[in-house]
Amino acid sequence: MLGIETSCDETAAAVVKDGRHILSSVVASSLPFHRKYGGIVPEIAFRKQLESMVQVAECSLSESGLGLEDIGLVSVTSGPGLLGSLLVGVSFAKSLSLARRLPLVGVNHLYSHIYASFLEGVRIKPPFVALVISGGHTSLFHLEDFTKIRLLGATLDDACGEAFDKVAKILGLGYPGGPAIEKAGRLGDPAALRLSCCQTTRPLDFSFSGIKTAVLYHVRRRIGVSSKNRHLSLFEVRDIASSFQQAVVEAVVTKALLACRLTKSAALVVGGGVAANARLREELFLRAAASGIHAYFPSKGLCLDNAAMVAGLGYQLFRKGRLAGLGLNVMLE
Ligand code: KG4
Ligand code: ZN
C-alpha cells in the first residue's frame, strides 16, 4: 500500500505491507515557512505540498526498497483538513491510480490517527473507545470496527492542540506550541495557577477556549495589555505552562475514562499530535490502569501526521470493499 497524507502542513508518503508493517514513512514539513506567522498559513502549506509531493512519494518508494510495480493500492487522506492541501494529495493519488490502474481508497484523517496504534504490533480487539487529540480536532469515538465509528463527544470551540498553540503564543514560546509548553512546563509548578477547563452540557464534549482566555487575562494582569517593555519571568512562564498543561490533561483524562465507563470499554486508543505529550501519556496510562482500562498510544513519531497510518487504514477499508473511484472528493469537516 502506498499512503499519501497532505491534510495540514505536512507532505507525507509511506509504504506499508499487510496493513501493519511500515516499510517506509517519509514526512516533509513546511513548518519553518509558517513559524514567523505563529501558525499554519494554508496558501504556503499547499504551495510547498505541490512542490514536494512527487519527490516525497518517490523517496518513500525508494526507502521501502520497492518499485511502483509492487504497489497494490493507493490510500489517501480525503479529509478533514485544509482544502488546498487535501486537493494536492487527493489529485496526486487519483493520477497515480488512473495511470497505474491501482485501486484507490479515501481515508478520514481522524480515523487514521486512531489506526496509528495498530502499526506497532499491538492487537486491540474492538469495540473500544478512541480519543483523537490534534491541532484541528478533539474527539471521542466508540469504534466497533473501522467502518462503524460513532462520535461520542467533541470540542465545542478550540481543539486541544490549538489551545496549546494559542497559549504558547501568549507566553511567547513560538509555534508549534505543544512541544514548547511541554518543555517549559517540565520545570514549572503545575499547582502554581488555579486553572481548569470549562464544564460542558454534554459530559463527553470538550471546551478549551475558556482556559486559553484565562491564561491571557492572567498574563495581562501581570504585564499589562501592551507588553512591549514588560516580560514574564522565565519562572512565571514555566509555572503557567505547567498549570495549563495540568488542567488540560485533567480534563482530557477524566472525559476519556468517562467515555470508557459509559460504553463499558476496557480499551482506550489514543492518537493525534497531543498524544505525544509525556505528561498526558503518563497520567492517562496510570489512571486508566487504575480503572481496569488499557490505554494504547502510538510511539511519538506516529502521533503526529504521517502517511503510514493512512496506508494501514486504507488496507483495512479496501478489505471491507470501501473503494473510492476517481470521483473521490475532499471533505473539509
Ligand atoms: O495530529 P497533528 O500532527 O496535526 C493535526 O492533525 O492537527 O497535531 C498537531 C498538534 C499541534 O497543535 C501541536 O501543538 C500538538 O499537536 N502537539 C503537542 C505535542 N506535540 C504536538 N501538544 C502537546 N504536547 C506535545 N508534546
Ligand atoms: Zn493530524
Image (tube, rainbow, N blue to C red):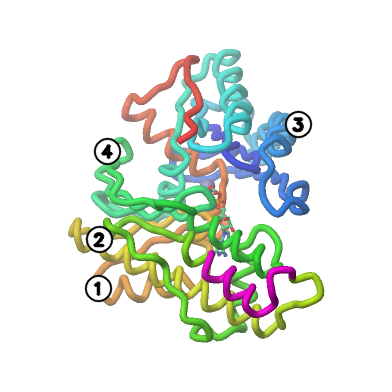
Instruction: Point out the tag, 4 or 3, that comes first from the N-terminus.
Output: 3
Point 63% across, 65% down: residue: 168
| x and y percentages locating residue 121 in the rendered image | 42, 54
Q: Residue type at mark 3: give it.
A: Glu
Residue 206 included in the magenta stretch of the image: no
- Quarter where residue 197 is shown: bottom left
Q: Residue type at mark 1: give it.
A: Ser
In space, the residues marked 1 and 4 are separated at their CA atoms by 26 Å
- Which residue lies under the disc numbered 2? 260
Nearest the eye: 180 or 36? 36
Instruction: Check contact, mark 1 vs mark 2: CB within 8 A.
Output: yes
Instruction: Point out the tag, 2 or 3, that comes first from the N-terminus.
Output: 3
- Which residue lies under the disc numbered 3? 51
- Which residue lies under the disc numbered 1? 291
| x and y percentages locating residue 56 in the rendered image | 69, 36
Instruction: Point out the tag, 1 or 2, that comes first from the N-terminus.
Output: 2
- Which residue lies under the disc numbered 4? 148
Q: Residue type at mark 4: give it.
A: Lys
Q: Which residues are magenta?
A: 213-226
In space, the residues marked 3 and 1 are separated at their CA atoms by 49 Å
Along the horizontal axis of the image, is 163 left or right of 204? right
In space, the residues marked 1 and 2 are separated at their CA atoms by 10 Å
In space, the residues marked 2 and 3 are separated at their CA atoms by 43 Å
